[in-house]
Image: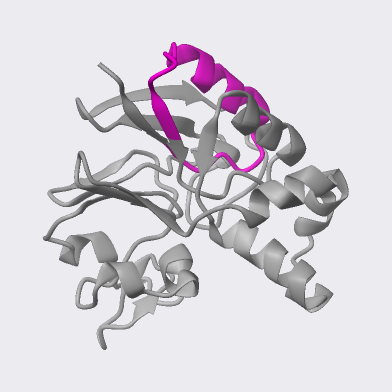
Amino acid sequence: MPRTIAIGDVHGCADEFEELLEALELEPEDRVIQVGDLINRGPDSHRCIELARQYRVESILGNHELRLLSARNQNKSSLLKDYDLPTIRQLLAEDWTFLQSMPKFIYDGTTETVIVHGGFLPDRPWQTQDVELITSIQVIDKKGNPGKRSDAPEAAPWADSWHGTPFVVYGHTPRPNVLERPGSIGIDTGCVYGGHLTAYIIEDKSLVEVRARKAYAHSKRLPDPV
């Protein structure tokens, strides 16, 4: 039976990405979707894109890709962070083409599942929410607005308020373990911070994980390593 497999935030961790792809023992009929933030922070963003091409991985737009593309398309280097610069030096013309082609989410009607980078606000039609929101949301504050954990540390994850269909598979918010809710699963398990790279198989709800070789970056919210 063909599988639909979602992979969490890779963040340039090419060795772990390749190890996970091999561990999945992919068949030609399988569909692999990466939840965004394929690149940046980790050591080898270019090779991650090469692996995505090699294994026919569909990758969704994450906030890191969105920022790099916005800076490039608008010629605004002020949008960039220090750790963006090594990534930009690695990327070839075909890599930028790959990034430009990323969709903002992927909906699978067979399983009634949408795969997105950050998430959705539950009180609006998910299909029409803008790309900045769905690549950045982590929590919902007391006023019902989307926010980051760092800006509203006491606010609940957006997924706590998501009760309807479709089922949502997302990344963006790194945690030591996946976050399972009735209507969603968060699969960013902090690989770049020394955690794991996680794959979620939608049909049987199983997980496949590989451990990070090392912590390539540091998080203010997670132990080091995760």
Residue 13: x and y in percent read 64, 34
Residue 77: x and y in percent read 82, 73
Q: Quadrant of residue 153?
A: bottom left
Q: Quadrant of the N terminus?
A: top left
Residue 158: x and y in percent read 27, 66
Q: Is residue 224 left or right of residue 28?
A: right
Q: Where 164 sits versus 170, above or below?
A: below
Residue at screen point 52% across, 33% down: 57
Q: Where 209 sits versus 91, above or below?
A: above
Name the foreground residue: 142 vs 38: 38
- In this picture, which residue range is highlighted in magenta? 7-32
Q: Is residue 205 left or right of residue 25?
A: left
Name the foreground residue: 116 vs 180: 116
For the question of whether residue 99 can be seen, the reply is yes
Q: How is the image coloured?
A: one colour
For the question of whether residue 40 can be seen, the reply is no
Q: Is residue 60 magenta?
A: no
Residue at screen point 57% across, 49% down: 37
Q: Quadrant of residue 188?
A: top left
